[in-house]
Amino acid sequence: MAVNDNKQAQLKRIAFKYFLEKGYEATNMRKISAEIGIKASSIYFYYDSKQALFMSVLNDILSERYEAVQLQMARDLKIDVPPIEKLYMLLNSSIKACAENSAPFKFILRYRIFPEEGIALSSREQFENWRNEEYELCKSIYDELSIGLPQYDSKLLFHHFKRFQSSMLNEILLSGIMLDDRTTQKFWQMFWSNLGI
């Protein structure tokens, strides 16, 4: 069983690299199998199709991001600071995670913005599920924040925050420039100012 688990982990790692670098359509199962040292048909022992392999890789990446937010939330809920400060800590944590390992963020960016035809519907559903799970995880912060901001309900605040967070991460990924704390704080203040707060 351990050998199969190891091969499956290796298969996902190599598939991740190909999907990220070449795209879904250009990723060739034979090349993945050759790099691992197995027959192409052996991949189908683990996954029914290339789409199933892709969705498994995507699910792993989104699960890792969810676990990171979950860990951050567990820390933040213990700290007695205003909800805006908790959101800023979440933002900072995602920026630092992106700086430490940008590949999963690039993967998310690529397939969220430009999903290829063979996986567009299933990947959109997966992204939507991930977003809903993240909202439920962080709902207490948005609920607390919306008490002081009657013009916004918690779901709307979440969507504004996620758009802002995504734009910050996309800027980092596309420019290759890491934001310092001062610049991040400046953008953070502009974000709230644009919301009229």
Image (tube, grey):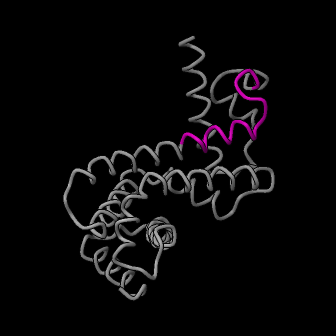
Q: Quadrant of residue 9?
A: top right
Q: Residue at x 61, y 40 (%)?
A: 57
- Residue 123 screen position, x and y as percent: 69, 51
User: Toward the viewer: 173 or 33?
Assistant: 173
Q: Residue at x 47, y 43 (%)?
A: 64
Q: Eyeballing the image, is 193 above or below 104?
A: below
Q: On the picture, is 49 further left or further right than 171?
A: right
- Residue 107 screen position, x and y as percent: 57, 53
Magenta stretch contains residue 72: no
User: Furthest-left residue in view?
Assistant: 80
Q: Quadrant of the N terminus?
A: top right
* Residue 174 visible to an observer of this rendering: no
- Residue 56 screen position, x and y as percent: 64, 37
- Residue 84 screen position, x and y as percent: 30, 70
Q: Residue at x 63, y 60 (%)?
A: 112
* Residue 65 visible to an observer of this rendering: yes
Q: Quadrant of residue 192?
A: bottom left
Magenta region's main secondary structure? Answer: helix
User: Toward the viewer: 113 or 143?
Assistant: 143
Magenta stretch contains residue 52: yes
The stretch in magenta equals 44-60
Q: Quadrant of the C terminus?
A: bottom left
Q: Residue at x 39, y 46 (%)?
A: 70
Q: On the picture, is 79 further left or further right than 102?
A: left
Count of marks placed on residues: 0
Q: Eyeballing the image, is 5 above or below 195?
A: above
Q: On the picture, is 135 further left or further right than 31?
A: left
